[in-house]
Image (tube, rainbow, N blue to C red):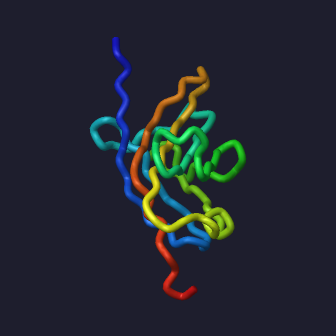
Amino acid sequence: MPIETSITVAKQEIVRGTDVTLSIAILDSVGNAKSLAGVTEIVWAMSREYTDVTPTLMKKLSLSEIVITDSGDGLIDIAIKDTDTSLFDLGQYVHEIVTTDGASLKTPVLRGKVELIPSLAA
């Protein structure tokens, strides 16, 4: 039996050099909230291209950079500090979230684009 996975596509905007929290809902293949019960790791990565070997920026649940705010509804917060993006070039990036379960099965659950924009007040 094939394993059905669903990758949610999400676009985010981040103002370069500012603290921001990305609040994300992880969904299943029909758009319902995906439970995070049994998930042991969540990794969020941002790069210029999906083919980049090393992500430009990475955040992990195990490093307390990602917080599960509602396990049953698949809600997470990703904390990005001002210093994380202050030296990045403006423009479009891609991002992805991968979950890992207790059996070490890694599942991509979200892909999309991130637009790094300038601050109007800077």
Quadrant in which the C terminus is drawn: bottom right
Q: Residue at x 53, y 51 (%)?
A: 46
Q: Quadrant of residue 81?
A: bottom right
| Number of numbered discs visible in the structure rendering | 0
Residue 122 located left or right of residue 109: right
Of 23 and 53, nearer the camera is 53
- Decide: is 53 above or below 47: above
- Decide: is 5 above or below 87: above
**Residue 14 appears at what percent x and percent y?**
49, 67
The residue most toward the bottom is 121
**Residue 82 appears at what percent x and percent y?**
65, 70
Quadrant in which the N terminus is drawn: top left
Residue 87 located left or right of residue 14: right
Q: Residue at x 53, y 42 (%)?
A: 52
Q: Residue at x 35, y 25 (%)?
A: 4
Of 55 and 25, nearer the camera is 55
Residue 7 located left or right of residue 72: left
**Residue 40 appears at what percent x and percent y?**
62, 34
The residue most toward the top is 1
Q: Residue at x 45, y 64 (%)?
A: 91
The residue most toward the left is 30
Of 112 and 93, nearer the camera is 93
**Residue 29 appears at what percent x and percent y?**
31, 35
